[in-house]
Image: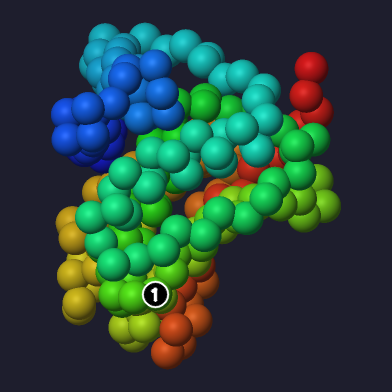
Amino acid sequence: MRNSLGTTTLAVRALEVGNLGIGGATGAVLKRGLSTLGLLISRATAEVRGEGSDQRQTFSVASFVSDVGLAARLDINLKLLVLEVAAVDPLLAVLTNRELLHAALVNLLQNAFKFTRENSTVSLSAYAFGEHVLIDVEDHCGGLPPDGVAKMFIPFKPNEDSRAGLGLGLSIARQSVEADYGTLTVRDVPGSGCVFTISLPRHSLP
């Protein structure tokens, strides 16, 4: 919820500062952020009540990555970083809860923006690997501390450099991905950074 609120706040600020119309790309980011917030609140309420519903849908990964890139650039504009978004095969598709996957991926990107060194890049890519679709977020944080990979997704157990904060965001992101039969992992690249990878079963567009 915090990440979605942050995205909508940045979108409103951009609209105000740039005197932009609500019908453009920034307006679309605002609408998506509000939609995600509504979904997360509804999901939390349903869980408290012991209810459940399947809100998964099949959608284009290329369109999804484009939407996430637009939202992420509102945040990265405040930092001395470059976001590189690789072209995605238009035929790639996944079957997931789009809003929750969007929130999880935005969380990974905001985490990357927070810890990547200034004047460097954060990369976002998606591609097929066998029967799966992989979505990578690669940063240039300098690498993880000892045992950093093991601690990354554990709530309330931050790393030595406080990279994961309380670990709640990454833990929730992993749970959201796993709920759609996927995985969220991290790979350390010593001296450079790390790569977060979301893996989901590959589907065909209707």
Residue 6 seen from this side: yes
Task: State the image quarter where residue 31 is shown.
Answer: top left
Give the percent coordinates (x, y) of residue 169. 28, 47
Q: Quadrant of the C terminus?
A: top right
Q: Is residue 138 left or right of residue 119?
A: right
Give the percent coordinates (x, y) of residue 99. 45, 26
Task: Find disc 1 in the rendering and name its residue.
Answer: 120
Q: Nearer the viewer, residue 188 or 19?
A: 19
Task: State the image quarter where residue 78 is shown.
Answer: bottom left
Name the residue at 75% across, 37% down.
Answer: 90
Q: Is residue 91 left or right of residue 170?
A: right
Looking at the image, residue 41 lies above or below residue 110: above
Give the percent coordinates (x, y) of residue 41. 26, 18
Residue type at mark 1 is Ser
Looking at the image, residue 113 lies above or below residue 22: below
Residue 147 seen from this side: no
